[in-house]
Amino acid sequence: MGVMRLGHVRLRVLDLEAALDHYTGVLGLLPVHRDPDGTAYLKGWDEWDFYSVILVEADEAGIDSFAFKVESEADLDRYREASLGHGVAVAECEAGEVPFCGRALAVTLPSGHLMHLYAEKRFHGKATGNLNPDPWPDGLKGAGGHWLDHVMIMCELDPARGINKVAENVAYFRDVLGFGLGEQVVAGPDGDVQAAAWMFCTTTPHDIAFGAGPRAGLHHVSFFLDDWSDVLRTADILAKRKVKVDVTPQRHGITRGSTTYFFDPSGNRNETFAGLGYLTQKDMPTITWTEENLWRGIFYHSGDVVGDFLGVYT
Amino acid sequence: MGVMRLGHVRLRVLDLEAALDHYTGVLGLLPVHRDPDGTAYLKGWDEWDFYSVILVEADEAGIDSFAFKVESEADLDRYREASLGHGVAVAECEAGEVPFCGRALAVTLPSGHLMHLYAEKRFHGKATGNLNPDPWPDGLKGAGGHWLDHVMIMCELDPARGINKVAENVAYFRDVLGFGLGEQVVAGPDGDVQAAAWMFCTTTPHDIAFGAGPRAGLHHVSFFLDDWSDVLRTADILAKRKVKVDVTPQRHGITRGSTTYFFDPSGNRNETFAGLGYLTQKDMPTITWTEENLWRGIFYHSGDVVGDFLGVYT
Amino acid sequence: MGVMRLGHVRLRVLDLEAALDHYTGVLGLLPVHRDPDGTAYLKGWDEWDFYSVILVEADEAGIDSFAFKVESEADLDRYREASLGHGVAVAECEAGEVPFCGRALAVTLPSGHLMHLYAEKRFHGKATGNLNPDPWPDGLKGAGGHWLDHVMIMCELDPARGINKVAENVAYFRDVLGFGLGEQVVAGPDGDVQAAAWMFCTTTPHDIAFGAGPRAGLHHVSFFLDDWSDVLRTADILAKRKVKVDVTPQRHGITRGSTTYFFDPSGNRNETFAGLGYLTQKDMPTITWTEENLWRGIFYHSGDVVGDFLGVYT
Amino acid sequence: MGVMRLGHVRLRVLDLEAALDHYTGVLGLLPVHRDPDGTAYLKGWDEWDFYSVILVEADEAGIDSFAFKVESEADLDRYREASLGHGVAVAECEAGEVPFCGRALAVTLPSGHLMHLYAEKRFHGKATGNLNPDPWPDGLKGAGGHWLDHVMIMCELDPARGINKVAENVAYFRDVLGFGLGEQVVAGPDGDVQAAAWMFCTTTPHDIAFGAGPRAGLHHVSFFLDDWSDVLRTADILAKRKVKVDVTPQRHGITRGSTTYFFDPSGNRNETFAGLGYLTQKDMPTITWTEENLWRGIFYHSGDVVGDFLGVYT
């Protein structure tokens, strides 16, 4: 019972064909459906549900919404009550309102982001099938991303005005949705301002992360790769295709992940992320990063301040 | 709520000092405690509970018991009732009876193996700590195994006599403990004999596996490594230390894991296993391997029958 | 001045189309030319000369000849004289006799193998070009082998009859062609029988190797891969394509290379070999393996005797 | 006959103990000797000669000299004549003048750098020995660098004044020492200014490189690692030890190498470099990078201009 995983993100892109070319040719997602208005649905080859990324053309880049899949309809009822009890607005969505999904809840997070919870989505199957499967399918393009791994969203933080949407989101995901808090950054003169958080519903280091900024937005969407050799291969592919790279291959201190950041043609930040990192569990002590070690946490190898990394987002 | 992870294994070894040298020097586990009778407790550097391996001297190698950690005492009550309802014998253990643990349940599995469930164990902490941690600690020995990953036990299967302890264990773990069934081997003339199973309570490909053999026993205990480069490094270390290697670096078809098998000095089979493989979820369709593809599933690269791999165990 | 590298091998295959499918689809060589009789010429994407593998249909698998490229025609003159002085038969080949090559020498090695030396071959260019090149080209198939790396040939050894063609070949390559001796196996009751040798003209661990057997033949032809992650990927591809695998990914003690062995459809043994291993130099002391460590030298991880590995060849 | 390899570098460091700690603890070189004045000699574990790095305390960081080993004394005679014929100043050094070496030539390169050529150096042996060796020794520290791989020196370039010490060095190494030119950067309005060059005497992509700057100096000394997984491990170690990192793990377009740059405590730039990259040969066409692709050549993944990378050197 409970939340299973990040199910999908709905991204706004400025040019749908350019975006499709990027998400299929660079990230290696598989296109599964187009709406009459062009809206595109894609999935990672290792995912079984119908899609995990929706690309919708818009005048401004960013994230419209993201969604988590729960185990059963009963979870939806339970989360509806608990959200309301927590003071978080929830609306019901009929089956199909979230495309190809059953009944859903539309949650307006404390940070202002729109999040759906759903229990059913059309089934598609992994590219390798369920019977005597090969470990990976033929014909993958680009990075061959396995699945949508996590999303990092930016939340308003203004201690002077008593606003900390990071902490409010953390409380909601912990108390209502039962997520664990894997890692956090604490800041401020007293080290008591929760300035970033990495939370999990699976047993991986994070399924969602919250960072602090002047406004709500999307920091990045991340796709899973096997290991560090895939990180190199992906970075090579980014260079071959002249993709705008934000951060070349690195180790995160936070989550231990090996990573590369880059931008889709609309300026939405993507990450390819490799390795399990470590196993998370409800009884694992939360890892805390202090403000003076923040950049070592973000980019372990250099520890350098990279202002645009936190300041530029959609 | 529910089962969190494989907490520990209690292994019988013929020579405790030789075993300690192996589990610390080859696998890189950290020794944390010795009982007055010599019984040794070890943990992986990336584990926070006090121990995950108990080595006890005995006349015969094998596994005495293994244990899963659950989230809360309430889980113990729930599993006690459900086990009895399922027809599985359960005994209560007072705090301390399972060393350094709180109250526990002693479950006699359909296969005859002894399994404990417990909710509390003495805390020790990761070697890297919880405050601004490095991704790995200095001074690791041998393979530097992160944690006890899973155990594979052998269960009696004799279709002619209507005995299938694999299937009985699967039913118990699925129906009572809420595990998912990630992969299975089906055999027999009608392809309806469940001859092996890989089950999960985390979101990794397996936390326990059941294989079929003429008698109950231990097939292997497995420790987690980051990736394929660690598999090579570990195999090099095995060679340097003249450890008896069973299976050189390979890819499993089943779980996709990259692996090396070898024996501790008493003949208990160890595995070092790398990579996440894939993310398991309750709604992931079970992967099925048919009998004629069994060996491709076990050793993907060669697909060769290696009789001793299934026939030799403790 | 001197021998530069292994230039090509001419392999006998039983079915040319099956062989072409294997060498292009599995090894990833690029087809560059067909003769009217079907004889096929292929090259690695990272080679600049016109071809490195010739496949010719025949009733029996094996190697017809192999060839080394020297720096200049003057080298041919010099090696002609020195070979004759060494008692080794040399014939002149006119330009074109060795296809697409200039004037060549046909050397009958002490072991009986036919080897050509040539100074000119038609130029083709790397797949990545010479101007602002990417590190690897798009569209590679299979293993994407970089280049023909080395060949191992089997030489008659019969100490009882005073026959050691390994040692005779070593003397020829060292004294006439100026190769270095990187590693050797010594055997026999007095440890003075040179039973295998790895020799270099580049600064890699070997460009040619000699093994001992009851008759002259081909042990394997080897193609270069970047690193251990490519070894895994190649082994996965072998499994996907159901290629007969001889030895799954391993570390050699000899040369330190990481390797996989398999067979082409005609039964010629192939190797994919990764990493530099170490830098060879004329003043590097030769590494010696004693008979009791022979198998540790061949297959470092297991050290196991694999009788067919030395006994089966074409 | 000819130049075999880069034999050693003599580096000026501001604090000898801090430097020793860095070159042993971070790079993993083995200390082999100290002079009475503290001058330290180190070697990589995979090198057989007595040392490859000399650390000498000085008021200013930089490189005093570097040295190449040739095959024989006859080479020294030959190079002496050819250098003089080329207009390059050469002085004779008696045995021992270059420490632990035989007779040597002191060459003042067109760029002003001091380079020694020698044919003999005291022998020490690889850490793994020559008899049934393991592929790597126990007890390595830090990155465990295999050997001194290459050096990049900065040479004055001022087209307006008709000064191009890059091109002059290239001509000397090519025409007198017989090096090959693997890659070059051409710049200037007509694309005819050779602004950087990578040259080889082994069959690896480079043994020495020349870059252009306002003054002669040392750009970096580089040490060999096996592969990309060692690059990650080394970068982790740099972070653990708070070494000043210049460039986090990347792929070079030029040489294809995977790399990390950092500084020793005195500000001398170090590189750890992994992989063979490709095999160089005398008949391999030189790879040319044009000015607008220069940064893609240097840092393939981002292609970004990193001004300090070329502007900061010792």
Image (cartoon, coloured by chain):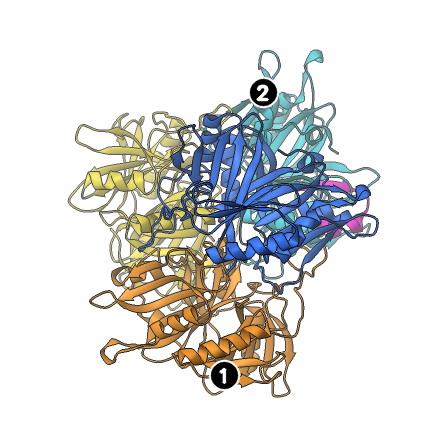
Chain colours: A cyan, B yellow, C orange, D blue
Could you say which is closer to the camera, residue B117 or residue D45? D45
Question: Which residue does the image show at 65% across and 27% down from the upper left?
Answer: A305
Q: What chain letter is assigned to the residue under label 1?
A: C
Residue highlighted by disc 1: C14
- Can you give x and y, in whole percent of width and height, for residue D244 in the image? 57, 30
Q: Which mark is residue C142?
A: none
- Can you give x and y, in whole percent of width and height, for residue B268 in the image? 26, 48
> Is D186 rendered above or below residue A131?
above
- Can you give x and y, in whole percent of width and height, for residue C105 in the image? 53, 80
Same chain for the residues under marks 2 and 1 in the image: no
User: Is residue A12 shown in magenta?
Assistant: yes
Amino acid beneath label 2 = Glu
> Judging from the image, what secondary structure is the residue with disc 1 in?
loop
Q: Is residue A289 left or right of residue B56?
A: right
User: Is residue B154 shown in magenta?
Assistant: no
Judged from this view, the residue extending furthest toward the left is: B59
Question: Which residue does the image show at 73% across and 41% down from the upper left?
Answer: A11
Question: Which residue does the image show at 30% across and 63% down from the upper left?
Answer: B307
Residue C230 visible, this orientation: yes
Start and end of the magenta stretch? A9-23
> Is C155 rendered above or below residue A278?
below
Q: What chain letter is assigned to the residue under label 2?
A: A
Q: Is residue D59 left or right of residue A141?
A: left
Could you say which is closer to the camera, residue C57 or residue C7? C7
Residue highlighted by disc 2: A292
Q: Quadrant of residue B138?
A: top left
Residue D3 visible, this orientation: no
Instruction: Kindly report the distance in space between the C-alpha atoms of the residues bearing marks 2 and 1.
Output: 68 Å
Decide: few, some or many residues near mark 1? Use Cα within 10 Å; few <14, some 14-19, many ≥20: some
> Is B241 rendered above or below residue C257?
above
> Judging from the image, what secondary structure is the residue with disc 2 in?
helix
- Can you give x and y, in whole percent of width and height, for residue D181 in the image? 64, 56
